[in-house]
Image (cartoon, helix red, strand yellow):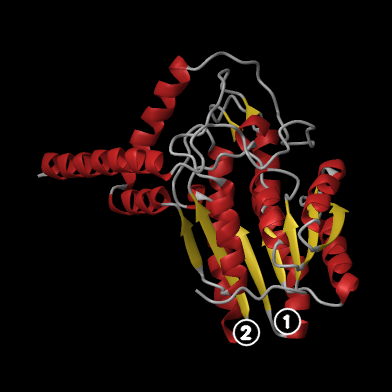
Amino acid sequence: MKEIRLKGKTIVITGASSGAGRAAAVEFSQHQPNLVLASRNLEALEEVANECREFGADVLTVETDVTDPKAVIALANAANDWHNRLDIWINNAGVLAAGDFDSTPIEVHEQVIKTNLLGYMNGAHAAMPFFKAQEHGVLINNISVGGYLPVPYGAGYSASKFGITGFTEALRGELSQWPEIHVCDLYPAFLDTPGIQHAGNYTGKQLKPAPPVYDPKRLAEAMVNVANDPQNSTYVGSTSVLLKISHALFPGLTTKLTGAIMRRYLKKAAPIQSTSGNVFNTVNYGMAPYGGFGIAGKPRAHRKYIAAGLATGLIAGVCLTLFRK
C-alpha cells in the first residue's frame, strides 16, 4: 500500500454531518489536510469540524444543499479560495425513500434523484474547471451497491444510483485525455449509519438495513486510500462483491429474491407512520457516524451472513439453470 500523502491537500466532502460522510471527515483529518465539510446542517458540521481539528486538520464548514447548482459552485469557489487549491472532491450527500412506487409521492422520487444524481453531477460540474485548470484532481463518488443492484420499494433511489454509475463512466471516458484527473467509484455494502433513520418512509413499517451491515469506518478508510491512490472502482466489503456477481450472473433471479426478502421483512416489521424524513429538509437527530444497527466492526458476524448468502445464491443459480433445461 502506498504511503498516505494528503497533508495540505484541499478535500471537499459533501454530506459530512453524519454517517459515512462524518466518518470520512474524521478519517481524513488524521492526515492533516485542508478539509472542507459541507451539508445542510451547519450546527452538526461544526461539531464534526471541532472533532477533526483535534487531529490537526484545518477545517472549513460550508452550509450547502447539493440540489442547488449555485450553492455547489459557491462551495467549490470557497474551497479553492481558502488555500488556492482544490485537490479532491467527494460526492457523498444522499437521501433514501422507501415505499411502493405508486404510493410514494412523485415529488419525493424527484427529490431523491435531485439529491443523489443531480447533486453528484452538480459537484462534478463545479469541481471540474478547477481540476482542468491545475491539470489534476480526484473526484470520488460514493455510490453503494445500489449502483448495480436494484432496490425494490426504493425505485427512485435505484434510478438515482444507477444513474450515477452511468454518469461516472461517461465522464471517465471524456476525461481519458486528462491522465491526472481521476473519477473514482465506491460501492460499499450496507453500512451501520443513520441513513435508514433519516429515510423517507412510505412503507408503513419500521426500516432496518439488511445484514450484514458494515462499519462506516471501512468506507472512510477506502475513501482515504482512493484519494491517495486513485482507482476506477472499489468494492467495500465482501458482500458488495458477491451481490455484484449474483446480479451479473442471475439478474432476474437476484431481483426477484431481493423483492421477496423485502416483502417478507415488511410483513413482520413494526408499524410506523409515513414520513418524508430528511428528503426535503435536514433533521436534528441521528447525526453520529453510526446508526446503532448492531454488528458493525464484527467481521466474524459478516462471514456468517456472507457464507449463507453465497450458498443461497449458488444453490438458487444452479436450480434456475437446471429448471431452464
Q: Nearer the viewer, residue 280 or 83?
A: 83
Badge 1: residue crowd in 10 Å (few <14, some 14–19, many ≥20): some
Q: Residue at x 54, y 38 (%)?
A: 155
In the rendered structure, are the residues bearing label 1 and label 2 in contact, judged by CB atoms less than 8 Å apart?
yes
Q: Secondary structure at mark 1?
A: helix
Give the residue drawn at x 74%, y 54%.
Answer: 14
Whole-number angstrom distance, CA of label 1 to CA of label 2: 8 Å
Query: Mark 1 belongs to which amino acid?
Result: Lys
Q: In the image, residue 129 lies at what x, y percent? A: 77, 76
The structure residue drawn at horizontal position 45% and vertical position 41%, both measured from the top left corner, is: 298
Q: Residue 178 has which mark?
A: 2
Q: Quadrant of residue 85?
A: bottom right
Q: In this orientation, does residue 171 appear?
A: no
Q: Is residue 314 left or right of residue 220?
A: left
- Return the x and y of residue 32 as percentages of the image width and height: 75, 67
Q: Is residue 241 above or below residue 94?
A: below
Viewer-proximal residue among 60 and 111: 60
Q: Is residue 204 visible?
A: yes
**Amino acid under disc 2:** Trp
- Is residue 69 or residue 221 the one in the foreground? 221
Task: Estimate the x, y position of residue 153 in percent, counting from the top left.
Answer: 51, 31
**Quick one: label 1 or label 2, which is nearer the N terminus?**
1
**Residue 120 image-quadrant placement:** bottom right
111 vs 189, left or right, is: right
Q: Please give the label number shown on residue 85.
A: none
Total number of numbered discs in the rendering: 2
Quadrant location of the C terminus in the rendered image: top left
Q: Residue 132: give its label.
A: 1
